[in-house]
Amino acid sequence: MCSVYVQADPIQYEARTRSIRINNVLTTIRLENLFWDVLAEIAAREGKTTNQMIATLHQELCGLREAIPNFTSFLRVCCLRYLSLPRLDDDAKAQALLRTSLVADPATNLRH
């Protein structure tokens, strides 16, 4: 069982530092590459860049909390929460889209 984890590509757990502008303040965030990849995926789904997504998360968190003791840890938790969401594979997504389009326009004439 542990081989699934220990055989991970070392580049995934190598940390990388990025400079990000949050509220017109330039700051650096250091995360492992795998977390950067997940944040990029989240951002893409939201139609934003990774930096825009991080700035949005920071802004929304500041709206809920007075202080943010460890924003980097918060980002890691965001990634894990995102990865724990139920996912549909591509075939299931295509089928759901087809069902939605058929229901949305019942007048569509389908011929076999």
Image: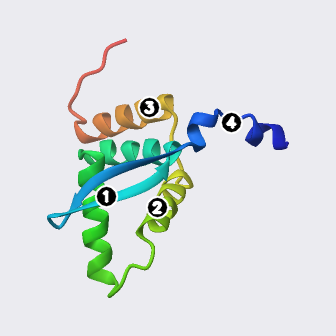
Name the front one of labels 3 and 1.
1
Q: Earlier in the sequence, mark 1 or mark 2?
A: 1
**C-alpha separation, residue under disc 4 versus residue under disc 1:** 26 Å
Q: Specify the farthest residue to the top.
A: 112
Q: Secondary structure at mark 1?
A: helix
Residue 106 sits in quarter: top left
Measured as percent of width and height from the top left, residue 40 is found at 37, 43
In the displayed structure image, the side of residue 15 where residue 4 appears, left or right? right
Label annotation for residue 54: 1
Image-quadrant location for residue 107: top left
Q: Secondary structure at mark 2?
A: helix
Circle 4: element type: loop
Q: Which residue is mark 4?
A: 8
Percent across and percent down for residue 17 are: 41, 49
* Residue under label 3: 95
Residue mark closest to the camera, 1 vs 2: 1
Q: Is residue 65 above or below residue 76?
A: below
The residue tagged 2 is 78
Q: Residue furthest right?
A: 1
Location of residue 41 with respect to 74 vertically, above or below: above
- Looking at the image, the residue that sits furthest to the bottom is 66
Frontmost residue, 22 versus 64:
22
Give how far apart the Cα atoms at labels 4 and 2 are: 21 Å
Query: What amino acid type is highlighted by mark number 3?
Result: Gln
